[in-house]
Image: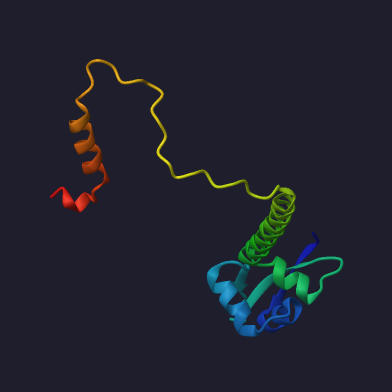
Amino acid sequence: MGRTRRVTLREAADILGVSKEAVRKRVLRGTLPSDTGEDGRRYVYVDEGPTTSSSEAGLGSDPRDQLIAQLRDEVEAWREESRRKDHIIAGLVERLPPALEAPSQEPRESPVSPGPMETPTEEREGQEAASERPWWRFW
């Protein structure tokens, strides 16, 4: 990046484009390297890039800010992907032919013919009537 410069809290705040209190909090969190000078003042080490602007230095100095920016970019990419897929699905739905007739609700016949061991017709009718009753009637 560039060389590192040792500055006071106020100078670091001006370079980073944040308040003096924000610089102090970053020092307490350990995201900005610092030390105490012989005069008892706190000094901060700030990278000096070739084109250090306050917005670049403010966003690039804290790894959490970088992570937040990266996550925002990813969320925006997912939103764009979702919009693209919705557009494709809408186009496919428009091309579908109109719905065919709904299937009839008549009961289908069994493909197997009744054998000689089937229950008598009266018992089957009783079972069919019982199967048509609501479940709570069985109790």
Q: Quadrant of residue 4?
A: bottom right
Q: Residue furthest right?
A: 50
Rendered position, 68 above or below 23: above
Q: Quadrant of residue 37?
A: bottom right
Rendered position, 106 above or below 39: above
**Residue beneath the point at 75% across and 53% down:** 91
Left or right: 8, with 109 as reference point: right
**Residue beneath the point at 64% across and 84% down:** 20
Left or right: 133, with 48 as reference point: left
Rendered position, 15 above or below 32: below
**Residue beneath the point at 35% across and 20% down:** 113
Residue 133 position within the rendered picture, expressed as x and y whole percent measured from the top left? 23, 48
Residue 134 position within the rendered picture, expressed as x and y whole percent measured from the top left? 24, 51
**Residue beneath the point at 63% across and 49% down:** 99
Residue 12 appearing in the image = yes
Residue 71 position within the rendered picture, expressed as x and y whole percent measured from the top left? 64, 60
Q: Quadrant of residue 131?
A: top left
Q: How many marks?
A: 0
Q: How is the image coloured?
A: rainbow
Q: Nearer the viewer, residue 20 or 5?
A: 20
Residue 41 appearing in the image = no
Q: Nearer the viewer, residue 12 or 52?
A: 52
Q: Quadrant of the N terminus?
A: bottom right
Q: Residue furthest left?
A: 139
Q: Residue furthest top?
A: 116
Residue 98 position within the rendered picture, expressed as x and y whole percent measured from the top left? 68, 50
Q: Nearer the viewer, residue 73 or 4?
A: 73
